[in-house]
Image: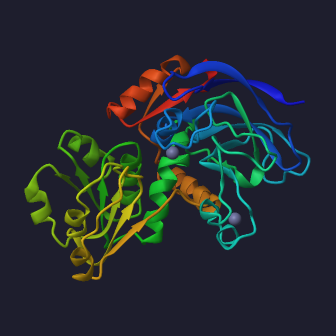
Amino acid sequence: MPTTVNAYIATAADRPLEPTTIERRDLGPNDVEIAIAYAGICHSDIHTARNEWNGTTFPVVPGHEIAGTVSAVGEGVTRYAVGDRVGVGCFVDSCRECEPCRLGEEQYCERGNTGTYNAVGRDGQRTHGGYSTSIVVDENYVCRIPEGIALDVAAPLLCAGITLYSPLRHWEAGPGKKVAIVGLGGLGHVGVKIAHALGAEVTVLSQSLKKMEDGLRLGADHYYATSDPQTFRELRGRFDLILNTVSANLDIGKYLGMLALDGTLVELGLPEHPIEVPAGALIGKRRSFSGSMIGGIAQTQEMLDFCAEHGIGAEIEVISADKINEAYDRVVASDVRYRFVIDTATL
Ligand SMILES: [Zn+2]
Ligand SMILES: [Zn+2]
């Protein structure tokens, strides 16, 4: 028998989210049932709930930054036991057969990964996310949250954390490397912490100097305002890696100009309009312009272990469920330092 659980649901793009109940599937042999303790609010949740990407099938329960404890396991489960601290990120399944899946890059599954919400699972049922008291997920798509991190500050690591960790590792951020993070928000602030812990020299490029004190406290070595034209002149040819967490359309040529020889600029957000790249900014210093999307399950586990080892969690504001709609407006207004996390006990 499916289990009925409490949740917060979006029923239409122009309506606030509201409390409801949903059903979770029966526990399959490889499934774990997770009692969700905290769910982070990611900007993607808002884009989906408000149908800003035009791909939402209503109703939908958002939430793909999930942290909790295992409350039941299927008979074939080997990795987890009741009581284990676990997390679930942006997807809950993939084909498991294609090249990316075999390489542990399930996020790039050729048949498409199964989103944690607003998707259809292999059982034919629509998936619903973490704004709920419980979720059932195949154990292969669940990660362990080490004892070293509290569940509330761990939740945002499942999307924001891995979104930054994966490109930092792929482009080998570490000692001797100069890394810039564009935007000090939900994504960027975790990126600063991780890049610093990896040993890189970290620069924040923010619109203004308003959050400079925070940035330096979180581990940045330098902090510049992109509203100041002098910044782009001063930092010309400086960085090995620039991670852009800002979804607005930036003047990419100016940012490419801050890359050193063989440097790479990586897009992590989804700007509304196509990006114009001046070729001259690339060929002059063999620069690259790339993109990256979350990370695979094995790397997400590696990220959680790394964060536990270095005492890294997200900077959060815990809210009760009845504040979700207000929190959405505040995220859109950049009025949060730096991630809202829902206490699911209030659902
Ligand atoms: Zn997200
Ligand atoms: Zn696949």
| Percent x, y of residue 212 | 21, 44
- Which residue occupies the extreme front position in the image? 54
| Relative to 341, 184 lies left or right | left
- Residue 347 seen anywhere in this rendered image of the structure: no
Tell me the quarter of the picture where residue 27 sits.
top right
| Relative to 66, 195 lies left or right | left
| Percent x, y of residue 100 | 64, 70
Vertical comparison of 249 with 56: above or below: below
**How many badges with numbers are in the image?**
0
Q: Quadrant of the N terminus?
A: top right
| Percent x, y of residue 160 | 47, 48
Please report the residue visible at 22 percent of the width from the left and 41 percent of the height from the top. 213
Please report the residue visible at 35 percent of the width from the left and 60 percent of the height from the top. 243
| Relative to 71, 66 lies left or right | left
- Which residue occupies the extreme left position in the image? 230
Please report the residue visible at 27 percent of the width from the left and 41 percent of the height from the top. 214
The one of 12 and 182 positioned closer to us in this rendering: 12
How are the residues colored? rainbow
Tell me the quarter of the picture where residue 94 sits.
bottom right
Q: Quadrant of the C terminus?
A: top right
Please report the residue visible at 70 percent of the width from the left and 40 percent of the height from the top. 127
Vertical comparison of 45 with 199: above or below: above
- Residue 304 seen anywhere in this rendered image of the structure: yes
Vertical comparison of 326 with 160: above or below: above
The one of 264 and 18 positioned closer to us in this rendering: 18
| Percent x, y of residue 206 | 23, 48
